[in-house]
């Protein structure tokens, strides 16, 4: 194998090459998967035609499979790899491009950059940009938000070709690295299964269309600082963890676990919550849990009418709703409607559909998750402490 230093700048492509490069990666993966199924993976890798095309991380992933032959759960792998390739195409081939230009950060931006260091993506001399679609007004956007916007089919172009190329290569490295990690995680999941108990309708990896609500929540949580990241597929599938969130002072190295769902119906909500082991150590983010949190804040308002310690003005939340709900269930339904409506139609902002979610609701989501991240972590620490005393 060639040294990793040789591929430090991999891939050596220009931004106009990305769609064709994506196609080549997908074709190579399909060919390698067929070889794996036939027990011929090692001999195909030895041909020397794949390492430079795949990059070191993805090449190493397939090298670890060696000449293993697929077991009775191969169809699970076939469907999961198809979903992972759909995710790769989604990230690499945008349907719309925004114009972007470098902006020197202000003092406020510097504080945001510090908070984003919880989950750094990779080093870059440029972190802040102004971006817009066509003749619309420019908006401020951070580099990690630009990378996350790829999920919504949003690409970015720059006046300088060198910046276009640098950004394109960075996008490719992140997307292919994620694919490599997910393929490793996929095999760990399959190895855990008992074929006798496997259900035919089981899906290990969701397609991008099924992750839209989750990604909307990710964007909202990262609007003012990068606190959230997508959990690895092993955590997602085996441990019901969609996102990991970290905040200053949380003292939880990997971050608090977050399960995200758009379910607002109480019975379905209860069933999903009941399927999570140690659910009290999770943040369960849903329209219903948000509605219940609002009601609890209203109770605090009535008890502490002269208090100025509430996280935000609840009246602003009611003002942004078309219908004024009378109870928790109506509020959950209305919150769900607002959030799903934000994802209808193509994004009209380089930040994606997040901007269609009213600001008071975005504020509520962030405060809810941060508050419950500390609460769930305290419950985790209490359980660990009780266990050590036994």
Image (spheres, rainbow, N blue to C red):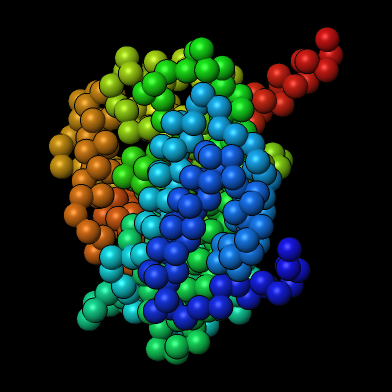
Residue 136 visible in the snapshot: yes
Quadrant of the rendered structure where residue 380 is?
Answer: top right
Q: Provide residue 36's location: percent of width, then percent of height.
A: 56, 42
Q: Provide residue 147's location: percent of width, then percent of height.
A: 46, 64
* Image point (72%, 26%), residue name: 381
Camera-side residue: 225 or 230?
Answer: 230
Furthest residue in direction left, as rendered: 323
Furthest residue in direction right, as rendered: 389
Above or below 55: residue 331: above
Quadrant of the rendered structure where residue 376 is?
Answer: top right
* Image point (28%, 30%), residue name: 332
Q: In which quadrant of the rendered image does the C terminus lie? A: top right
Q: Provide residue 121's location: percent of width, then percent of height.
A: 59, 62
Camera-side residue: 257 or 49?
Answer: 49
Camera-side residue: 238 or 256?
Answer: 238
Camera-side residue: 286 or 206?
Answer: 206
* Image point (56%, 78%), residue name: 12
* Image point (37%, 42%), residue name: 207
Q: Provide residue 171's location: percent of width, then percent of height.
A: 49, 67
Q: In which quadrant of the rendered image does the N terminus lie? A: bottom right
How many numbered badges does the structure rendering display? 0
Furthest residue in direction top, as rendered: 390
Residue 314 visible in the snapshot: no
């Amino acid at each position: 194998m060639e040294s990793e230093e040789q591929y430090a700048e991999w891939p050596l492509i220009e931004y106009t090459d990305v769609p064709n490069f994506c196609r080549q990666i997908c074709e190579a993966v399909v060919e390698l998967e067929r070889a794996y199924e036939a027990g011929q993976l090692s001999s195909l890798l030895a041909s020397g035609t794949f390492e430079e095309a795949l990059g070191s991380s993805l090449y190493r992933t397939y090298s670890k499979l060696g000449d293993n032959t697929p077991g009775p759960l191969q169809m699970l792998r076939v469907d999961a790899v198809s979903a992972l390739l759909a995710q790769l195409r989604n990230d690499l081939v945008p349907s719309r491009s925004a114009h972007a230009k470098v902006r020197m950060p202000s003092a406020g931006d510097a504080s945001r950059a510090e908070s984003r260091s919880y989950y750094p993506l990779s080093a870059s001399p440029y972190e802040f940009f102004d971006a817009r679609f066509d003749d619309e007004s420019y908006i401020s956007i951070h580099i990690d938000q630009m990378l996350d916007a790829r999920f919504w089919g949003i690409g970015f172009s720059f006046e300088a070709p060198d910046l276009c190329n640098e950004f394109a290569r960075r996008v490719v490295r992140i997307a292919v690295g994620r694919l490599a990690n997910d393929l490793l995680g996929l095999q760990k999941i399959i190895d855990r299964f008992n074929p006798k108990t496997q259900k035919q309708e089981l899906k290990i990896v969701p397609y991008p269309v099924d992750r839209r609500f989750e990604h909307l929540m990710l964007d909202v949580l990262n609007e003012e600082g990068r606190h959230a990241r997508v959990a690895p597929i092993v955590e997602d599938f085996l441990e019901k963890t969609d996102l990991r969130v970290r905040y200053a002072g949380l003292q939880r190295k990997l971050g608090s676990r977050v399960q995200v769902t758009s379910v607002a119906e109480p019975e379905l909500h209860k069933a999903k919550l009941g399927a999570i082991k140690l659910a009290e150590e999770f943040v369960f983010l849903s329209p219903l849990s948000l509605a219940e949190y609002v009601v609890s804040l209203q109770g605090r308002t009535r008890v502490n009418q002269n208090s100025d310690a509430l996280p935000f003005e609840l009246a602003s939340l009611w003002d942004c709703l078309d219908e004024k709900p009378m109870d928790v269930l109506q509020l959950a339904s209305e919150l769900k409607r607002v959030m799903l409506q934000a994802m209808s139609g193509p994004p009209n902002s380089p930040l994606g559909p997040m901007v269609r979610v009213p600001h008071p609701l975005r504020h509520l989501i962030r405060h809810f998750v941060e508050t419950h991240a500390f609460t769930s972590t305290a419950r985790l620490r209490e359980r660990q402490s009780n266990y050590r005393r036994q």
